Image (tube, rainbow, N blue to C red):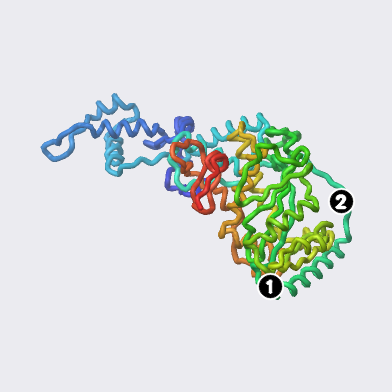
């Protein structure tokens, strides 16, 4: 942990080692270093300041009447001499008391160690962002008076949970790179006839119902790492998202989502509905040609889309069914499609190059917070999943993330101006700042996410369960 506002002048910490009581005292938060080597609880010092100034009236020389030194020494054992009384007068005049930073840091470290050990023993997955949440919660629960306090990732030990191995067919790397370059060069020529806002990439990606990371923080040297999840099957069962992104940096208003449902049908009670989601289902989460047709009808040919557009997709066989796509294309729309060569998608598809990674990092972070703070809330269930995806997609569509989307196109090699600077979704959503409270009235939970639009901080429940909307 790193307190970036600390300066050596705040206290002579090295000199404190000379005094035995100084190294014993920092076991509590909000301790005032009343004199070199002595720590006093903030509330006791406040009480002393209040008592020292409680008498009414003044002496003949104009000075305020105050309790005598023997009275103060008897009532407050840490008062030793007139110099200490002068300190009380200074505190009273300034109206503030400065707590010892090193004492607070030691307390936070001790409490953080207890919390981390507890979570590891319970099998919870822990990351750097989780530690920041823990520290923020410790500061909040103990009313520690810290300003501009941030947590550093330096010196933390991360270990692999498991290893995924797959057998894939490989093309010759040089051939793939050659085909990729040839494809990008051809598309760049085609793009000259289109406005960047009319150039799109669509791609599908599978998301686990309970998306966890393959790594967790644990004790150094541990070889076998077992972690707890809400539902083991949810870590292997998936749903599919199919976004559309434009070369201008905007995401489509609607995200196409395919869930796995028994018999390929939703229950009679239906499902959570959101304006920014088109939700479908099948006996598996895998896209079918019929679902592709629905995707074109409800998303690609949505009224918000331009009349003339260029759509880039991968080599999935259904994308190549030109006859079907032409049959459902409205007369008012003109669509040109380009198919990425097999094996080249990871190199030249903007969604793969720069979007899905950031998207999944956000979902994994949210899942981790839910596991730690809302253990009874089944995020892997149908409606909670849709609520979460709806909120995330809404946040990703913020104008502040347009440079992030444009960077995905530029990184894939297309003639899109590379932004000089951009933030990732996780950087904007999960702040390192810890001196925050959930903005909802009467909410005592520690915030975990900051809305990109209103820039206010929310706890998991107020943002996702209660479905925060500010615009």
Q: Residues within 10 Å of mark 2 (few under 14, many from 20)?
A: few
Q: Position of residue 464 (x, y in %)?
A: 57, 42
Query: In which quadrant will I find the N terminus?
Result: top right
Q: Which mark is residue 442?
A: none
Please report the residue visible at 76 percent of the width from the left and 37 percent of the height from the top: 262
Q: Residues within 10 Å of mark 1 (few under 14, many from 20)?
A: few
Asked if 343 appears above or below 147 in the picture, the reply is below
Q: Image quarter for residue 385?
A: top right
- Which SS class for mark 1? loop
Residue 48 visible in rendering? yes
State the residue position of label 1. 194
| Contact, mark 2 vs mark 1 (Cβ under 8 Å) | no
Residue 125 visible in rendering? no
Please report the residue visible at 83 percent of the width from the left and 60 percent of the height from the top: 321
Direction from residue 327 to residue 364 in the image, left or right: left
Whole-number angstrom distance, CA of label 2 to CA of label 1: 36 Å
* Residue in the foreground of this view, choosing between 263 and 248: 263
Q: Position of residue 198 (x, y in %)?
A: 67, 68
Please report the residue visible at 76 percent of the width from the left and 39 percent of the height from the top: 236
State the residue position of label 2. 168
């Amino acid at each position: 942990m790193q307190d970036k506002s600390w300066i050596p002048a705040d206290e002579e910490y090295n000199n404190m080692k000379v005094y035995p009581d100084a190294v014993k005292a920092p076991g509590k938060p909000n301790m005032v270093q009343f004199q070199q080597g002595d720590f006093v609880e903030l509330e006791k010092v406040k009480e002393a300041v209040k008592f020292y100034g409680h008498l009414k009236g003044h002496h003949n020389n104009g000075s305020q009447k105050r309790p005598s030194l023997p009275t103060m020494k008897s009532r407050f054992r840490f008062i030793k001499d007139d110099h200490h009384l002068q300190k009380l007068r200074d505190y009273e005049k300034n109206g503030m008391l400065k707590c010892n930073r090193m004492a607070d840091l030691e307390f936070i470290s001790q409490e953080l160690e207890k919390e981390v050990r507890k979570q590891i023993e319970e099998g919870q997955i822990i990351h750097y962002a989780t530690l920041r949440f823990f520290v923020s919660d410790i500061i909040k629960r103990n009313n520690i008076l810290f300003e501009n306090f941030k947590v550093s990732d330096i010196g933390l030990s991360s270990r692999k949970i498991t290893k995924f191995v797959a057998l894939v067919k490989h093309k010759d790397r040089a051939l793939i790179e050659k085909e990729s370059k040839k494809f990008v060069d051809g598309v760049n020529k085609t793009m000259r006839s289109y406005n960047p806002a009319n150039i799109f990439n669509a791609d599908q990606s599978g998301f686990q119902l309970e998306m966890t990371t393959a790594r967790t923080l644990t004790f150094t040297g541990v070889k076998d790492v077992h972690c707890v999840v809400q539902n083991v099957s949810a870590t292997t069962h998936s749903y599919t998202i199919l976004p559309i992104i434009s070369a201008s940096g905007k995401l489509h208003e609607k995200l196409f989502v395919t869930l796995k449902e028994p018999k390929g049908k939703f229950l009679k009670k239906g499902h959570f509905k959101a304006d920014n989601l088109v939700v479908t289902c099948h006996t598996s989460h895998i896209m079918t040609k019929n679902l592709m047709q629905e995707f074109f009808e409800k998303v690609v040919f949505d009224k918000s889309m331009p009349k003339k557009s260029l759509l880039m997709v991968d080599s999935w066989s259904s994308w190549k069914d030109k006859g079907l796509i032409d049959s459902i294309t409205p007369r008012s729309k003109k669509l040109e499609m380009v198919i990425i060569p097999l094996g080249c998608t990871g190199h030249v598809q903007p969604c793969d190059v720069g979007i899905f990674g950031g998207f999944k990092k956000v979902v994994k972070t949210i899942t981790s917070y839910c596991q730690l703070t809302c253990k009874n809330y089944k995020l892997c269930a149908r409606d909670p999943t849709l609520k979460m995806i709806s909120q995330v997609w809404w946040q990703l569509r913020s104008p502040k993330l347009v440079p992030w989307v444009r960077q995905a196109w530029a990184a894939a090699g297309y003639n899109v101006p590379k932004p000089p600077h951009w933030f990732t979704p996780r950087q904007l959503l999960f702040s390192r700042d810890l001196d925050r409270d959930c903005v909802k009235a009467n909410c005592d939970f520690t915030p975990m996410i900051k809305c990109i639009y209103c820039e206010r901080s929310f706890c998991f429940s107020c943002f996702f369960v209660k479905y925060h909307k500010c615009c």
